[in-house]
Image (spheres, helix red, strand yellow):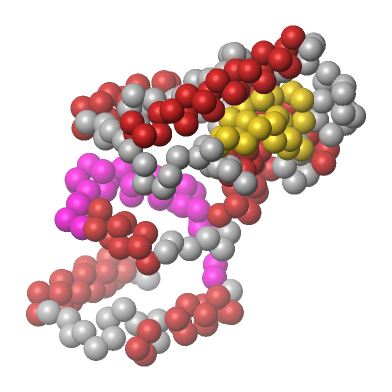
Amino acid sequence: MSQYVVYALCDPRFSEGDRRRAFYIGKSTTGTKRIEQHASNASLLRDDRYNWQKATRIRELLNLFGGLGYTIEILEELPSPPEGASLEQRLPYASALGLAERHYIKRARESGSELLNRTDGGENVVGPNVGKKLSAEVCRQMSVRLSGQGNPFFGRTHSAETRKKLSDINTGKKHSPEQNAKLSAAMKGRTFSAETRHLISEQKKGEKNPFFGKTHSDEAKKAMSDKRRGYKHPLYGKPRSPETLRKMAEGSKRAWAVRKANGT
């Protein structure tokens, strides 16, 4: 199947020909990947600020039918640009895709379909900023605008159901070696300020700590021990420097002094 498609999200409760069946028409430059994202975006509340009616309908269908909730109907497949095509080379393909989306939305509305699209279609296929990197100043401004009360999720919390979905989505996921290398390179040389370290510490003290009041089972402690035993230990075969040994000794002395003062 072509990666450039125009599709309809359909409500399985209504038969073909019913004007309520197709409730959203969209386009994709990534085949079914974009089409399936509607379900995850709706369940994680990502789409509410853009099209809350569509997101609400999809959540309703998810609760009724599970899976994606909706059914997918491919209205038209269009030619995709060759791999590695430049922005200029992709524009004609994008333009054709946008026009096709507008055509199907217009035709559906003229036939009385109750679409939840907020526009007439054809937008955001290849915008003027594709391929451009945002400047540090623009990134800072976006960060400020979305901080605190400017964040659309400010004051809200995920429900237990949403937290479980997030957990299920991420369980078992592992970074590829390439991703690990990129993350490592991005973090090298970065240090937290004293103020930031203090804030992190305060956020994890006492009852705020996610492990507060919990203890590891004997099975968990054995598993952790086995993972760090012998050659599996990150310091296996690496001697500690005199400076590190000095710091460890000073830390132990302070800990014993505190315990002695507290009589423990």
Toward the left, the furthest residue is: 242
Write down the quadrant of residue 78 in the picture.
Answer: top right
Pick the residue in front: 250 or 142: 142
Q: Residue at horizontal 27%, vertical 69%?
A: 255
Q: Residue at horizontal 79%, vertical 11%?
A: 112
Residue 182 percent location from the top left of the image: 30, 57
Image position of 116 (left or right of 177):
right
* Above or below, comparing residue 141 to residue 213 in the picture: above
Image position of 33 (left or right of 60):
left
Residue 210 percent location from the top left of the image: 50, 53
- Magenta residues span 188-216
Residue 156 in view here: no
Q: Residue at horizontal 10%, vertical 74%?
A: 243
* Above or below, comparing residue 104 to residue 196 in the picture: above
Image position of 263 (left or right of 12):
left
Write down the quadrant of residue 172 in the picture.
Answer: bottom right
Write down the quadrant of residue 236 in the picture.
Answer: bottom left
Residue 217 percent location from the top left of the image: 58, 74
Image position of 125 (left or right of 16):
left
Pick the residue in front: 54 or 12: 12
Q: How many numbered badges does the structure rendering display? A: 0
192 within the magenta span: yes
38 within the magenta span: no
Residue 150 in view here: yes
* Above or below, comparing residue 197 to residue 214 in the picture: above
The quadrant in which the C terminus is found is: bottom left
Q: Residue at horizontal 59%, vertical 23%?
A: 100
Pick the residue in front: 180 or 83: 83
Residue 134 percent location from the top left of the image: 26, 31
